[in-house]
Amino acid sequence: MDEHRARSLIDRAYLAWSRGDVEGVLAQYVDDLTFSSNVGGADGQPLVIVGKPAFRPFIQGMAESMDSASVLEHFRFANGIGHARVEYYVRDRRTKHALSGAFRQVTAFRNGKILRAEQFHDAALMATFWRLVAHETAPG
């Protein structure tokens, strides 16, 4: 894997994400992938997803409930690891709440696909956004 191929692979994943193309996103990952984020898990804990069978419903749920776009803004590649800054926009379709910003991502590769993607968001901002969306979509 060289820098050009690594960047192209991540670009394809984010282009598919931005189109809501679940299968297009999954095609960029190995079957036993690990996806993690410092926010998004239960009770404000980090989110860790292992394997495509677990990643698919996560991606599908986001595609069904959110308008989103993500673009690789900066990328460097060293020792087989990609380091990126990603600009993003998400908008909940029900509440119309939107959030935009940037996050860092560290990516490892295997056999021309993404093996591990670790995302580092502004945890307080993301947690507030998801609490607001969850509160306004809750029954009652």
Image (cartoon, rainbow, N blue to C red):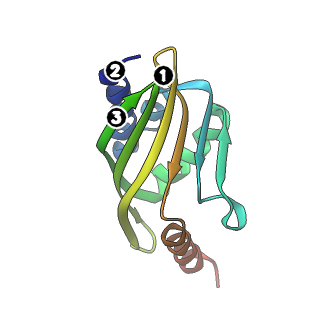
Disc tally is 3
Disc nearer the start of the sequence (2/1):
2
Q: Residues within 10 Å of mark 1 (few under 14, many from 20)?
A: many
Residue under circle 3?
Answer: 76
Mark 1 in CB contact with mark 3 (< 8 angstroms):
no
Name above or below for residue 35 compared with residue 112: below
Whole-percent x, y for residue 34 in the image: 62, 35
2 vs 1, front mark: 2
Residue 71 is tagged as none
Whole-percent x, y for residue 61 in the image: 55, 51
Q: What element carries label 2?
A: helix
Residue at image coords 38%, 33%: 10
Q: Between 42 and 80, which is closer to the camera in this rendering?
A: 80
Q: Residues within 10 Å of mark 2 (few under 14, many from 20)?
A: few
Marks 1 and 3, Cα distance to the nearest angstrom?
Answer: 17 Å
Residue 5 is tagged as 2
Residue under circle 1?
Answer: 113
Mark 2 in CB contact with mark 1 (< 8 angstroms):
no
Q: Which amino acid does label 1 sit on?
A: Lys
2 vs 3, front mark: 3
Residue at image coords 58%, 38%: 56
